Image: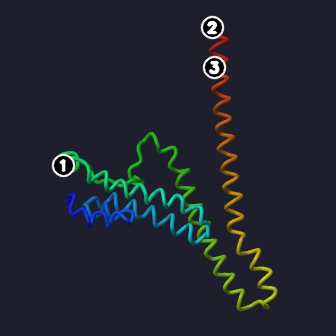
């Protein structure tokens, strides 16, 4: 059952992403917000990518203000708010079914890469015991930063793909406009 509840406890719970929503009875909203925040935090920690926590901070601010915006609604509006997940993985509209396989592949790639990085760091710990100190230190400096280098190259590659896709879209619009002007 949803309710606005005690404002002191609502403030306390709103400091943890998703907990404020759950405190007010919006379990689906709270669980999905908390899961998103924890996933970003986990990936940023495992891959040692501090700047990724900017996304975590955005989720934190969203959750904090969402709780207080819900609480500021009039009673009629508050009780009419439907508790729903932020992401709908099970219910994909027909118009978006074409895009879902790409998102699924991206999620799979992120999970595989995270697993590889975790194994990589475990291998470094194992090599510490097996290799001579000087050899291990030389290998460690290269191997420790390799996952970050791969991520940096991947981000640049995705940026280039986005720019290329936008350029093709703009070129297509310009050609279409020229065809329309030429036909007149």
Measured in 3D between alpha carbons, the distance from the residue under mark 3 to the one under mark 2, in whole angstroms, is 11 Å
Residue 75 numbered tag: 1
Instruction: State the residue in front, 88 or 121.
Output: 121
**Viewport quadrant of the N terminus:** bottom left
The residue under the point 66% across, 24% down is: 174
Element at badge 1?
helix
Which residue is located at x 40 percent, y 60 percent? 33
Upstream in sequence: badge 3 or badge 1: 1
Residue 181 drawn at (x, y percent): 64, 13
Q: Which residue is mark 3?
A: 177
Residue marked by disc 2: 184
Within 10 angstroms of label 3, few (less than 14), some, or many (20 or more) residues? few
Say whether residue 30 is left or right of residue 127.
left
Q: Position of residue 68 (x, y in %)?
A: 31, 55
Q: CA distance from mark 1 to mark 2?
A: 58 Å
* Left or right of 181 on screen, residue 100: left
């Amino acid at each position: 059952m949803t309710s606005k509840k005690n404002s002191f406890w609502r403030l306390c719970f709103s400091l943890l992403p998703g907990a404020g929503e759950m405190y007010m009875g919006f379990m689906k909203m709270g669980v999905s917000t908390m899961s998103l925040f924890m996933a970003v935090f986990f990936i940023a920690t495992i891959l040692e990518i501090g700047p990724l926590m900017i996304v975590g901070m955005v989720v934190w601010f969203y959750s904090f203000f969402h709780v207080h915006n819900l609480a500021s609604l009039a009673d009629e509006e508050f009780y009419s708010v439907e508790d729903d997940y932020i992401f709908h993985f099970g219910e994909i509209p027909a118009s978006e079914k074409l895009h879902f396989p790409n998102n699924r592949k991206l999620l799979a790639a992120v999970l595989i890469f995270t697993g590889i990085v975790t194994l990589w760091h475990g291998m470094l710990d194992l090599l510490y015991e097996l290799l001579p100190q000087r050899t291990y230190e030389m290998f460690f400096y290269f191997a420790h930063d390799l996952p970050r280098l791969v991520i940096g190259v991947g981000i640049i590659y995705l940026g280039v793909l986005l720019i290329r896709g936008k350029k093709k879209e703009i070129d297509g619009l310009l050609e279409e406009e020229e065809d329309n002007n030429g036909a007149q």
